[in-house]
Image (tube, rainbow, N blue to C red):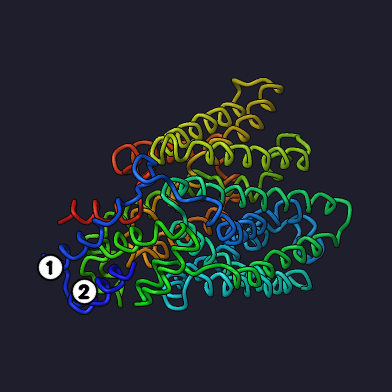
């Protein structure tokens, strides 16, 4: 361990202003690695570190995902009573704004998430994301006007925009390679639990006009827990190393992996930091440099994820079920259960089948389910068939989404981005996510009125088919590889 630290201290000064590592630098790193075989997550060489060490830190970080899911669904059952109580009932644009203003705030938050995560560290970024969610939920719960509701939703959105990218970063950077996919998928389970919790919490809103305020107050509890419990969690070793705090990074690796893995992990971390200028991550490098392809893949995946129409289901499933003559409360609970079930399948299969297989299967299943929903609203379907195909198709759609298209994009992007650019790249790609999410939330009800269910489902299905083709041609498999192995292989392939 001491030799690794000395190598880092000596070589850091040499390579900080160089793009290409010197032979002396790589030679010194190779000597540092000879003392131990690098653990790659396969379990064939040196065994795997215990997953129990990193699990508590991942669970605390997952509170952000729980809040994300809760705020996505909190207006589903309550939107009607909110509109009546605040005086904008029947105004579809105002109802859309209650949904999409949160997404607009998330776009703003995501733009700054990379700067926050790199500037103050992952732990402090979590705490900063919790603050506007607490304040915003409190404003929404106590407002007496549409303007107050929009302000509260906007503040909540800022916290939501910071949270997902920091969660993806943190979980990726503290997880052993062999369970990184499982941990990444577990954050999707937290999102599902939050969404399901919001649907359950909103059930009394149909009979109690003021119940929606309680639903917003509930969300302040996990937000406060996130801010408090993150004090007990470790900082990302990659961030510490990038800031020149190698000794602290070693101590964190010891907590997360165990003492026998520290030397190997530090040597591998040093090797991945090959001469890049660690003090700056310029946007131009993402848009025009060698990392452009990574950002292109990530942005396109997030765009296709949203253009599939998935969040329209979470925001407006009550409205859709009502049109089909199905009680919205029970139907929405089924949506939440399918989302949770699909996410559980993803946890089991992520590190077995891999990211690419799950993405292809997920988008293909979504395309099929959208086809079923389109058929449901044509003359080809009987009244019973309409009910079965519309509701069954929607549940299959959610189930398919949760197995791959939901959890994989953020995990995959956090894996394939070079460490120095990881936070900035995630911020750029998630900004694309939130822009499209905003317009889907704002325009879905109007598009449903003007285009009809058949054409709208056909459009969403088309984007799912495009996603299958895109994934097949562009996405690389990352299962079982350490972050440093992925980074080194990608860098060498672009040189």
Could you say which is closer to the camera, residue 65 or residue 59? Answer: 59
The CA span between labels 1 and 2 is 9 Å
Q: State which quadrant residue 216 falls in.
A: bottom right
At a point 45% along the width and 40% down the height, the residue shown is 351
Q: Earlier in the sequence, mark 1 or mark 2?
A: 2
Above-or-below relation of 39 to 334: below
Could you say which is closer to the camera, residue 264 or residue 42? Answer: 264
Q: Is residue 338 left or right of residue 418?
A: right
Q: Total label count? A: 2
Q: Dot 2, how many residues are within 10 Å of its Cα: few (below 14), some (14-19), or many (20+)?
A: many
Check disc 2 and report the residue beneath it. Answer: 11
Check disc 1 and report the residue beneath it. Answer: 24
Q: Is residue 262 left or right of residue 320?
A: left
At a point 53% along the width and 71% down the height, the residue shown is 123
Q: Residue furthest right?
A: 207
Asked if residue 213 can be seen in this view, the reply is yes
- Residue 259 is situated, as x and y percent measured from the top left of the image, at 44, 60
For numbered disc 1, what is the local secondary structure? helix
> In the picture, which quadrant includes the N terminus?
bottom left
Q: State which quadrant residue 141 falls in.
A: bottom right
Above-or-below relation of 365 to 68: above
Tell me whether the residue at label 1 lies in contact with that at label 2, contact meaning CB atoms closer than 8 angstroms. Answer: yes
Could you say which is closer to the camera, residue 338 or residue 151? Answer: 338
Q: Is residue 180 left or right of residue 89?
A: left
Q: Is residue 375 left or right of residue 296?
A: right
- Residue 149 is situated, as x and y percent measured from the top left of the image, at 70, 69
């Amino acid at each position: 361990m001491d030799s690794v630290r000395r190598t880092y201290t000596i070589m850091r000064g040499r390579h900080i202003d160089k793009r290409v590592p010197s032979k002396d630098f790589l030679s010194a790193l190779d000597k540092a690695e000879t003392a131990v075989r690098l653990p790659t997550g396969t379990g064939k060489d040196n065994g795997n570190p215990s997953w129990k060490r990193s699990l508590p830190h991942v669970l605390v970080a997952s509170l952000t995902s729980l809040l994300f899911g809760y705020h996505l669904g909190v207006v589903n059952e309550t939107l009607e009573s909110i509109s009546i109580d605040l005086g904008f009932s029947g105004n579809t644009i105002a109802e859309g704004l209650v949904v999409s203003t949160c997404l607009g705030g998330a776009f703003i938050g995501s733009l700054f998430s990379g700067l926050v995560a790199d500037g103050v560290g992952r732990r402090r970024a979590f705490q900063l994301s919790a603050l506007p969610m607490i304040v915003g939920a409190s404003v929404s719960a106590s407002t007496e006007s549409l303007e107050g509701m929009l302000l509260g939703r906007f503040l909540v959105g800022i916290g939501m925009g910071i949270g997902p990218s920091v969660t993806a970063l943190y979980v990726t950077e503290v997880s052993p390679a062999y369970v990184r996919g499982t941990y990444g998928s577990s954050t999707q389970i937290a999102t599902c639990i939050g969404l399901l919790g919001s649907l359950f919490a909103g059930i009394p809103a149909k009979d109690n006009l003021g119940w929606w305020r309680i639903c917003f107050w509930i969300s302040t509890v996990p937000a406060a827990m996130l801010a408090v419990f993150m004090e007990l969690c470790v900082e990302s070793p990659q961030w510490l190393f990038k800031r020149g705090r190698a000794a602290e990074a070693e101590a964190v690796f010891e907590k997360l992996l165990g003492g026998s893995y520290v030397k190997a992990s530090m040597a591998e971390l040093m090797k991945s930091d090959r001469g890049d200028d660690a003090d700056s991550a310029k946007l131009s490098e993402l848009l025009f440099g060698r990392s452009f392809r990574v950002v292109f893949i990530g942005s396109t995946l997030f765009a296709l994820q949203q253009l599939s129409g998935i969040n329209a289901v979470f925001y407006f499933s009550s409205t859709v079920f009502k049109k089909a003559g199905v009680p919205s409360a029970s139907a929405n609970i089924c949506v939440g259960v399918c989302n949770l079930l699909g996410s559980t399948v993803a946890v089991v299969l992520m590190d077995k089948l891999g990211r690419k297989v799950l993405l292809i299967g997920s988008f293909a299943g979504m395309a099929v389910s959208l086809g079923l929903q389109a058929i449901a609203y044509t003359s080809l379907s009987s009244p019973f068939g309409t009910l079965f195909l519309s509701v069954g198709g929607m549940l299959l759609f959610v189930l398919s989404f949760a197995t791959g298209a939901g959890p994989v994009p953020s995990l995959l992007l956090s894996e394939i981005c070079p460490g120095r650019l990881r936070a900035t790249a995630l911020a750029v790609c998630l900004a694309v996510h939130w822009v499209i999410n905003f317009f889907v939330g704002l325009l879905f009800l109007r598009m449903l009125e003007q285009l009809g269910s058949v054409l709208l489902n056909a459009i969403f299905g088309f984007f799912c088919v495009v996603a299958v083709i895109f994934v097949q041609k562009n996405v690389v498999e990352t299962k079982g590889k350490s972050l440093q192995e992925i980074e080194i292989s990608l860098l060498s392939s672009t040189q």
